[in-house]
Amino acid sequence: MNKKSFGSRIVAAPYIVWAAIFIIVPLVIMVYFAFTDSNGAFTLTNFAQIGRFKKAFGLSIVYAVIATVITLLLAYPMAYCMTKMKVSSQRMIMLLIMLPMWMNFLIRTYSWISILANTGLINKFLGLLGIKPLQLINTPGAVILGMVYDFIPYMILPIYTAMSKIDNSLLEAASDLGSNSWARIKRVIMPLTVPGVISGITMVFVPSVSTFYISQKLGGNKTLLIGDAIEYLFNTGPQYYNVASTLSLILMVLILLCTLIMNRFGDDEEVVV
């Protein structure tokens, strides 16, 4: 056996063990429960109950798409502006973006309750202006706001990384060929940042479509996403593990399909100067 090959396997051994224990084994268990009943016998009846949760699936996809689009619209110009700043300013802005991520996810989400509640900061400020309190909490808008706030760093970082790696000579060449600022953005910057955009969309869409804590705290009982349904079934008792595993399997397949489609679009992009 080649010594180099043996050494590489030794170095990779911890990762292989980690992947087997925390990735492969849970997936196998999920698939097993999805295709069996409470007695362990093979069955497909679990998939027949998916129709009961079609509204939750639909809402999850719609909310995730809206949150992803809003996040992209906010993150792209912000990343572009960051690349035009001084290096010291870029580092400061990056620190401000990363700072909330150092806090616990639950605390970040829960803090929005004190902001959006009927007696929260926004409604108190509106009260000072003589405006009646608005229903901000327990609404679809609050859920989407929570998604955008919690996941926007995952959109900014890959786009900023892709933009910062663009060779300035390409932009200079575009200018020499008569391209104005918008043309340079459209024909050079946008195509070259497609990999970062695809990564950002994936990193925002996947947790958004499967989230449950944000919808529980900011949406109340009025918003039931597929993550909420899965979490509820698992907490109800072992007799619902099979249905919950089936929903998890379907959700995973949908996420994989969306990721493959987005990567396919990303592979087709070209730079046109």
Image: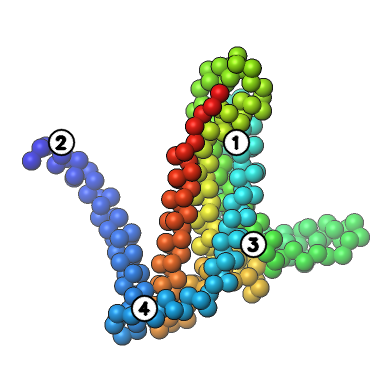
Asked if labels 2 and 4 touch by Cβ distance under 8 angstroms, the answer is no
Q: Is residue 118 above or below residue 151?
A: below
Residue at mark 4 to residue at mark 3: CA–CA distance:
34 Å
Camera-nearest residue between 140 and 65: 65
Kindly report which numbered mark, 4 or 2, lies closer to the viewer in this rendering. 4
Kindly report which numbered mark, 4 or 3, lies closer to the viewer in this rendering. 4
Q: Which residue is label 2 attached to? A: 4
Camera-nearest residue between 97 and 139: 139
The local secondary structure at tag 3 comes to helix
Left or right: 260 in relation to 106: left
Q: Which residue is label 4 attached to? A: 44
The local secondary structure at tag 4 comes to loop
Q: Which residue is label 3 attached to? A: 143
Q: Residue 19, how many percent across, how many down?
A: 30, 55
Residue at mark 1 to residue at mark 3: CA–CA distance:
24 Å
Q: Residue 117, how many percent across, how many down?
A: 73, 65
Camera-nearest residue between 29 and 153: 29
What residue is at 30 percent from the left and 60 percent from the top?
A: 24
Q: How crowded is mark 3: few (under 14 residues within 10 Å), some or many (20 or more)?
A: many
Q: Residue 87, how many percent across, how many down?
A: 57, 26
